[in-house]
Amino acid sequence: MKIMIRKLASHYQDVCRGLLFSGITFACSGLIAPCNALAQAAAVPSDSELVELSLEDLMSLEVTSASRKTQSLADTAAAIFVITNEDIRRSGVTNIPDALRMVPGVTVARIDSSKWAITARGFNGRFARKLLVLIDGRSVYTPLFSGVFWDVQDTMLEDIERIEVIRGPGATIWGANAVNGVINIITRKSIDTTGGLAVAGGGSYEQGFGGIRYGSELGGWGAVRAYGKYSNRSELKTEDGRQANDEWDMGRGGFRLDGKTGLNSFTLQGDIYGGTESETITLPAPANPPGYSITRTADTKVAGGNILSRWTRALDDDAEVTLQFYYDRNKREIPHVLDITYDTFDLDLLHRFQWGGMHETSWGGAFRFVDESFTGSDTLSLNPGYRNEKLYSAFLQDDITILEDRLHLVIGSKFEHNVYTGFEVQPSGRLIWTPNDRLSFWGAVSRAVHTPSRGESDNVLKQSAFPNPAGPLFPPVVVSVQGPGNLKAEILMAYEAGVRIQASKCITLDLAGYYNNYRRLIGVNTSAPQFVAGPPTYLLVTNTLVNNKDGEAWGGELAADWQALERLRLILAYSYTSLTDSAWANSPEHQVSLRSQLELAKNVELDLWGRYVGASQDYQRNRLADYLTLDVRLGWRPINTLELSLVGRNLLHQHQQEYRPEYLQTQPSAVGREVYGKLTWRF
């Protein structure tokens, strides 16, 4: 193995030395300015005490998502942003999707009360499929469309340690579908959450929510915690002010056990959830003139659970081996549309070791088995209705120290075999140069693929029906979307570069730029109308999915953190995204987020969060207006174990539509003003 790695490193070393963009240096000029005051960042409440975290500490935060090993944020050769537990607490958000609005380069658009469209660096959609999402190392994508049902991804927000967000490919480590980014949600170890926690609140939209968690040590060798939470959300309104009929409620519970004996550490955790979500959907109905559609309120039932076990053994010379297994079950029933159940079994092995004085090598393999059962309708069907999928994968990555503590070259590749396109290879080369402790430059070249999903390969979807343009005497027209079963993988070649600057003890800057070249993107071929004899009688226009598009995207992202005064911290995120085809809808060019964290007094906090999202187009090329909004949070800790907060969200507009769905014609809702109060008690 050593000989193989040496040859691989020698082959790529000269190539990857040229990855840094020469123009980065000028972007840094003028940014380093003196600070008028040195200060501490806001206090982070833990279960037992308040822990202070300076901006220097933030740059040295340990992350794991980029290379599946622990490394500091400043030493990571990727565009990575970390949402800390303190960021979540002071933002006032009540769900994970809204927390992701903090991240530069990530687009979050609410569709209705329980649905979001989320992506990184373009290609947003309800079924966005180029973003891999994990919770504690467990992939939460659905094989139905290789995306995420965000309504069922939740936990106690107080138990989230951090959310690591990589913009750009992560395929070398995480595999197919980690094309435009990776989101890794990491919860706290149970030893860090001993004692009790109770949360309760309610308001104009968040009608009622609450949760309780209790953790305990287990004789010095480990700890365990268990939690339960429930939320009930009222309906939003449509853009024209009507009731949207999209209220929903959800309950969940879970546990986590962590232990360590000698050189072995282990984790066992699990969750279970269930709930009901209302939505208004419009289904094509060629037998229902004159509109040839039916609009009804559907109560979607969701349920599921998971269990994960992970064992790690420390070896000599800072080496380790990790074995992880999880089982995940998801069930979703949309009346008159679909009833689907997925059972996923995943086994993963990782081995990391050092050798030769300059190499840190990671390799591993995985096997995933998905058993899926689908019952469709006249609107949506999959053929066959039952199917199982097997995914085999392996990866090899080497972190080569060229100059100790200064210059590192990281090369590797993922190798996968799937049931749709067969064998896929996803290599990358990354270089990071750290001339001093306050400055680092990085560059990367990566190849990533999106493999077809079940919904793209096997589907038949009646998308819409409308009167025949030739007149009322002619049969109506039905438009369908159909998967041919022989799609190829979409391919991305990504070129990235970035710089991180610790300008002083009170200013940090993180700048990243990218150019993405896409090939074999999935588009459609439209057939000539075909006459379908009744009843009902109609003309069928079929859009068959094919790999007939290429495209380009480029842009940049800036994250800045400034401790302006001893009691005032400002956090800025800006992103620019340019796409060559305006049909890639719902991706605004400009996005800005500015957060202010102010300590009014020793135990009183005032947090402001302003956001601007530029205009975009929906999938019918209708313009979605840009918008500016503001969130405000006022927090008070009368005693160290009790926190009261009052939160106002989306205060600058009464009704703002953020997205128009492209399929299954869910009636979109408009996000509006809301106010809620929250109590958090640690005991």
Image: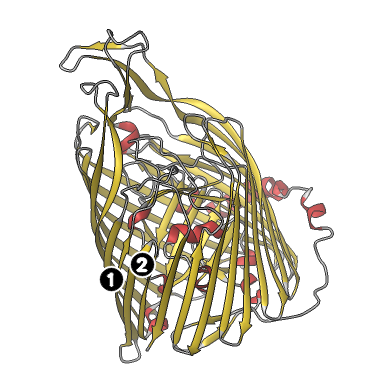
Q: Circle 2 sits on which residue?
A: 155
Residue shown at the point (36%, 11%) measured from the top left: 528
SS class, disc 2? loop
SS class, disc 1? strand
Instruction: State the residue in front, 1 or 354.
Output: 354
663 with respect to 597 (left or right): left
Residue 484 position in % (x across, y down): 32, 25
Residue 654 position in % (x across, y down): 50, 53
Can residue 2 be seen by looking at this rendering? no
Can residue 192 be seen by looking at this rendering? yes
Q: How is the image coloured?
A: secondary structure
Outermost residue on the front side: it is 241
Instruction: State the residue in front, 540 or 460.
Output: 540
The disc labelled 1 sits on which kind of residue? Gly
Residue 282 position in % (x across, y down): 30, 34
Between discs 1 and 2, the one toward the N terminus: 2
Relative to 170, does residue 308 appear above or below in the rendering?
below
Residue 220 position by quadrant: bottom left
Residue shown at the point (33%, 9%) measured from the top left: 471
Residue 365 position by quadrant: bottom left
Mark 1 to mark 2 CA distance (whole Å): 8 Å
**Tag 1–tag 2 contact (CB < 8 Å):** yes
Q: Residues within 10 Å of mark 1 (few under 14, many from 20)?
A: many
Relative to 227, does residue 296 appear above or below in the rendering?
above
Q: Residues within 10 Å of mark 2 (few under 14, many from 20)?
A: many
Q: Circle 1 sits on which residue?
A: 254
Instruction: State the residue in front, 405 or 213.
Output: 213
Instruction: State the residue in front, 289 or 544.
Output: 289
Residue shown at the point (56%, 41%) measured from the top left: 625
261 with respect to 65 (left or right): left
